[in-house]
Image (cartoon, helix red, strand yellow):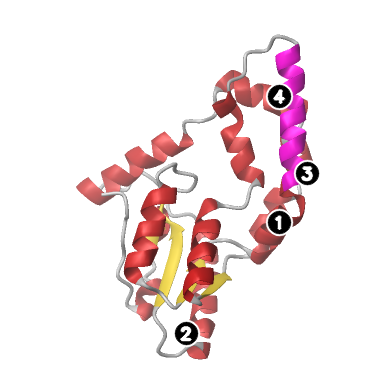
Amino acid sequence: MLGIIHRDRRNDEVLGRWIDALVPEVITLELSPYGLHFRQAMGEVYRKRIDDIVHSLRSEGYPCSPGDVDDLYAYVDIPREFMIADDYCRRKGACLHPVDMDLFSWTKLRRIDELISRENVEKNLAFGAREGRGTENVLAGLYFRSGVAAFSYTDEMALRDRFMCRGIGLLAKRFSGKRFLHIAGWRHLTDPLALYAQFHPVKIFPYD
């Protein structure tokens, strides 16, 4: 299991290097099929909407640097971890399977028109909502270096982990004897319910 910080700029280098080193034959990913297909079909449409809003704000003198809307772009773009894993699978003839729950993706993405509105883009710029990855770095450091879990393992995470483990289990039967790699957000490595224990995973936080 590779536990990553989603949308971290280091992932392009770090994740690709680790996947190549581990040489998996099957990769499973914390990404729902619905979320993937939605972004493949509509990502460019919503990215253009963001660009149009930003262009309008700039024309009115609103300060906006290129990085100010990175989190909005990340919300509508295909995740980099999928792109990196997909590139590896194409090169090596491996299989890639998104295994997260469609339900939660649908619940979040159905509000995307509300999220990507001029009003919300202005709020995003005004409050500088780009510190999430920095916070994740701090929390991950506390956990992996000091054993301090300054975050909660939510009911939603438990439900999703059960669902993903069920999917991985089915794939393990289908691809018996193959080398598996599961890529997920680093918090899933904590696995307080020992849901992933059935697979005897080696857990890797790839940034140290």
Q: Secondary structure at mark 2?
A: helix
Residue 166: image location, x then y, percent: 53, 78
Is there any visible trace of residue 168 in the rendered image? yes
Which residue shows up at 73% across the image and 45% down it? 44
Query: Which residue matches tag 3?
Result: 45
Q: Are marks 1 and 3 in contact (CB under 8 Å)?
A: no
The label on residue 17 is none
Q: Secondary structure at mark 4?
A: helix
Which residue shows up at 62% across the image and 52% down it? 78
Spatial CA span between label 4 and label 2? 46 Å
Q: Are marks 4 and 2 in contact (CB under 8 Å)?
A: no
Residue 189: image location, x then y, percent: 37, 61
Q: Is residue 102 magenta?
A: no
Q: Which secondary structure class fits the magenta region best?
A: helix
Query: Which residue matches tag 1?
Result: 40
* Type of amino acid at the residue the image marks with label 3: Val
Spatial CA span between label 4 and label 1? 22 Å
Query: Which residue matches tag 2?
Result: 172
Q: How many marks?
A: 4
Tag nearer the camera, 4 or 2: 4
Q: Earlier in the sequence, mark 4 or mark 2?
A: 4
- The span shown in magenta is 44-59
Q: Earlier in the sequence, mark 2 or mark 3?
A: 3
Spatial CA span between label 1 and label 2? 27 Å
